[in-house]
Structure formats: C-alpha cells, structure tokens
Amino acid sequence: MSRPKKHPPLSSRELLERIGLNEEHPTNLLVDEPLDDLRGDLGGALRERYQSLVQTHRFAPGDLVTWKAGLKNKRHPRYGQPAVVVEVLETPLRDGEDDSGSTYFREPLDLVLGHIWDSDPGRGELMVFHYDSRRFQPWTEER
C-alpha cells in the first residue's frame, strides 16, 4: 500500500494563483456592484426589494433566468448573465446552514440552475447549483 505524496506547503501567493486570483487578474471578493440606489431613501429601497422578492415567476426547464436587481446572494451567476433552468423542485430543499445569522439559513432552494463557469478550474463547463427562485426573473438580452 503506497502512502500519499506529501506536497510542500503553498505560499499565499501560490494559493491565490491556484484559485484564480493574482495581480494580473485581481478580483474584489467583497463588492461586485455599487449600491448607488441606496444613497437616498433606504426605507424605499427596502420596500422595493421586498416587492421584487415576492413577485413570483413560473419557470420551466430550459428557461433562461437572471438575478432580480438587489436580490443576488451568491457569487454565481454574475448580474446580467443568464442561467438555464435545469429543474424546478416541487418541494424546496432547505439550505443546511446552521447559523441563523447566515443569509443562507433555511433558504428555500427550489430552483436548479446551470451556468457556464467563468474561472479556472472548470472554465467553460456547465455547473449546476440550487437557488431560491424568488430571487430570479426571466432573462432577456436587453438586461
């Protein structure tokens, strides 16, 4: 029986390179889009996002969808990029996050979406993940 090879520890620079982050292609991991619409009436923005969240759409496998404005809670797909509906679950799965302070705590995952992965490894591959359908709308090229 052979032992697994021991690899020397990676430097932080090597680790960042392996996950696709480097000085040539920096990525801000904390901020994707500006929040210009929140500089005015925060209460109005909250009501607007709530109304968007509760406005439902009926999706079917093969439909193209995208995030509703202000409701993106995962890194992928990016705003404005389409995803394809792979499956609509009749009974939503509940995210298993145990921390009630997490944005994913008991989130109802009723939509299975596929999208093209845009970073290495796996760049260009179709990846499939579960999402909350309330956060999505039909995708059109104008968006």
Image (spheres, grey):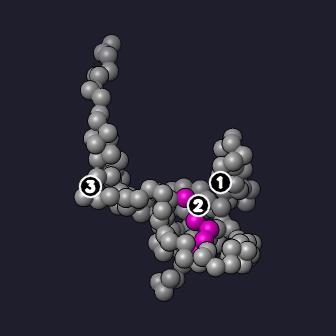
Alpha carbon separation for disc pair 1 and 2: 8 Å
Residue stretch in magenta: 69-74
Q: Residue at x 69, y 54 (%)?
A: 107
Q: Secondary structure at mark 3?
A: loop
Amino acid marked by disc 1: Thr
Q: Count residues near mark 2 (Cα–Cα under 10 Å), then give few for <14, some for 14-19, many for 20+.
A: few
Query: Residue 75 location, x and y as percent?
Result: 50, 59
Mark 1 or 2 closer to N-term?
2
Nearer-the-camera pick, 89 or 23 = 23
Q: Residue at x 26, y 26 (%)?
A: 8
Q: Secondary structure at mark 2?
A: loop
Alpha carbon separation for disc pair 1 and 3: 30 Å
Q: Count residues near mark 3 (Cα–Cα under 10 Å), then give few for <14, some for 14-19, many for 20+.
A: few
Q: Residue at x 54, y 76 (%)?
A: 36
- Where on the picture, by quarter, is residue 72? bottom right
Nearer-the-camera pick, 11 or 108 = 11
Mark 1 or 3 closer to N-term?
3
Amino acid marked by disc 2: Asn
Q: Locate the N terminus by quadrant.
A: top left
Residue 62 counted in the magenta span: no
Q: Nearer the viewer, mark 1 or mark 3?
A: 3
Query: Residue 22 location, x and y as percent?
Result: 28, 52
Q: Residue at x 72, y 78 (%)?
A: 44
- In screen coordinates, is 18 left or right of 143? left
Q: Nearer the viewer, mark 2 or mark 3?
A: 3
> What residue would you read off at disc 2?
73
Looking at the rendered structure, the number of numbered marks drawn on it comes to: 3
Mark 2 or 3 closer to N-term?
3
Residue 72 counted in the magenta span: yes
